[in-house]
Amino acid sequence: MSNELRNFLTLPYEELEELNLQAKEQRKNRVAAHKIQEQRLKYLTEETRIKAVTVLFSDLEGRLHMLDYDKKFLVKSWDNLTFDGSSIRGFTAQRESDLRLGIDWSAFYWVPSDVFGSGKVLVFGEVIDKNGTPYSADIRGVLKQFAEKLHKTEGYTLNAANEIEGFLFEGVDAERHYQETGRFEYVNTGGYYHSLPGDPLRAFIDTTAEVQRAMGFENEKDHPEVAPSQFEINYGYGEVVAAADQIQLYKLICRQVATNMGMTASFLPKPVVGVNGSGMHTNVSISKNGKNLFWDAKGEEKISTLAWSFVDKILTHGNDICLLLNASVNAYRRLDPHFEAPNQIKASAVDRGSMIRIPIGNEKSARVEVRSVGPDANPYMVLYSIFKSGLHGELSKVKNLRQAERYLPDNIYTALADFRSSSWNTKLLGADVKARYADLKQASADRCARLLGTFVKSPEIQFHHDIYNQFLWNQF
């Protein structure tokens, strides 16, 4: 069909940024949900150039799912959107498959048409059980409830910003073709901070940064990372659920931009041995009435008693939650001390091998950085387990926890054993969701060689939760 016959919404990047920043400000200011809902429905009804609304949600492992609803249908039926939960790994069994999608109208995005297609907008969904309650395996919903309750009862706002590293490889679907080639091809070998202005890595970073900016990410800096063909594109702090949503959008944008350029953006923690892996350093703080509760000018490393209690509780539960922060077989290759791996269960202002780092900060930026997180983890699970553990976890009986000689697991089997045996994880997730998550990770591990060895095996790529395809998975 000729494009002349179509009249779908296509907005300039500058206008997109303005719209998305306005929506972001509403979300930040906690504008009443019914007011935002009314605004969005009015907008969708009146904007005739929108053809479809893409609703996003994440499964238990953090894999992003998207459904396109016809705009006219969604405007009429937004409160009764059903889907088959038994088709989503980690969700319902076939005998109880019906689930609903609620719309989180505050998490609404206008998108560049050259990346997402014209005539579309995005919004995040909330998975709802048959009885109308939030679905227990939808960790986004669990995180949102947790954050809202803390704001209501304590006045706390949970803040997060994530530094997400990834690799850019030659060819489309390079991960899925790994079993055929046994290797990834770099697009750049320049190294940390170095690439020529017009080379493929720089072009990819520039394009991705432009898309993020248009979607209201409020970028801070971007650059090639330490390993060849590795990148990092940083953006500002956000309230915890919005921050987790941005992680999902960040990876989606990176993958689509790379695909458009004939390449693959990979968020495997360690796709190539012998070079640094990719992490998702997770910076967190808590504020109340606009005041950063982690700051104390007179405190140790200039952070408060609350912040140190938060750190110590996470360290206490370091092994308990390791499988939530490092969610794949491949993730345990990254926890290698030869490559600045944060595998030591301690906190430090200077040692980058520590699970937690205390960055230099001030009254505005004082924070805690959890460094052991892999970029392939479920972002909602990561932020929920960090904040829940840091605030409501237990304290170790070790006298000096910050100097204790303890280490994170170096393989998924040890992490699984720690996860299953932990009573804290049962409190964190509930027995049912805990068991589902463990079973998914066990199945993935059992399809791979038990010992990691010195080279990346095909099964740890092919059967990775974020990469696998239906055909291969069903061969088992």
Image: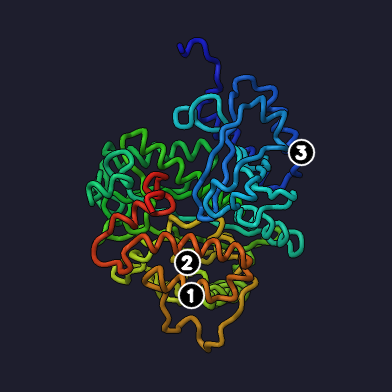
Observer-nearest residue: 424 or 135? Answer: 135
Disc ID at residue 35: 3
Please tell me which of labels 2 and 3 falls first in the chain: 3
Q: Which residue is mark 2?
A: 323
**Amino acid, disc 1:** Asp
Cα distance in 3D space between marks 2 and 3: 39 Å
Q: Is 386 placed above or below 207 here?
A: below
Mark 2 Cα shell of 10 Å, populated few (<14), some (14-19), many (≥20): many
Of the two numbered discs 2 and 3 in the rendering, the one whose residue sits closer to the viewer: 2
In the picture provided, is 138 more to the left or to the right than 270?
right
Observer-nearest residue: 113 or 184? Answer: 184
Please tell me which of labels 1 and 2 falls first in the chain: 2
In the picture provided, is 441 more to the left or to the right than 475?
right
Mark 3 Cα shell of 10 Å, populated few (<14), some (14-19), many (≥20): few
Q: Are marks 2 and 3 in contact (CB under 8 Å)?
A: no
Of the two numbered discs 3 and 1 in the rendering, the one whose residue sits closer to the viewer: 1
Q: Are marks 1 and 2 in contact (CB under 8 Å)?
A: yes
Disc ID at residue 418: 1
Secondary structure of residue under mark 1: helix
Instruction: Identify the residue shown where x is 63% and y is 27%.
Output: 71
Q: Measuring from the top left, give residue 370's x and y in whole percent.
A: 48, 66
Q: Measuring from the top left, give residue 402's x and y in whole percent.
A: 48, 81
Mark 1 Cα shell of 10 Å, populated few (<14), some (14-19), many (≥20): some
> Quadrant location of residue 426?
bottom right
Secondary structure of residue under mark 3: helix
Instruction: Identify the residue shown where x is 57% and y is 65%.
Output: 434
Secondary structure of residue under mark 2: helix
**Amino acid, disc 3:** Lys
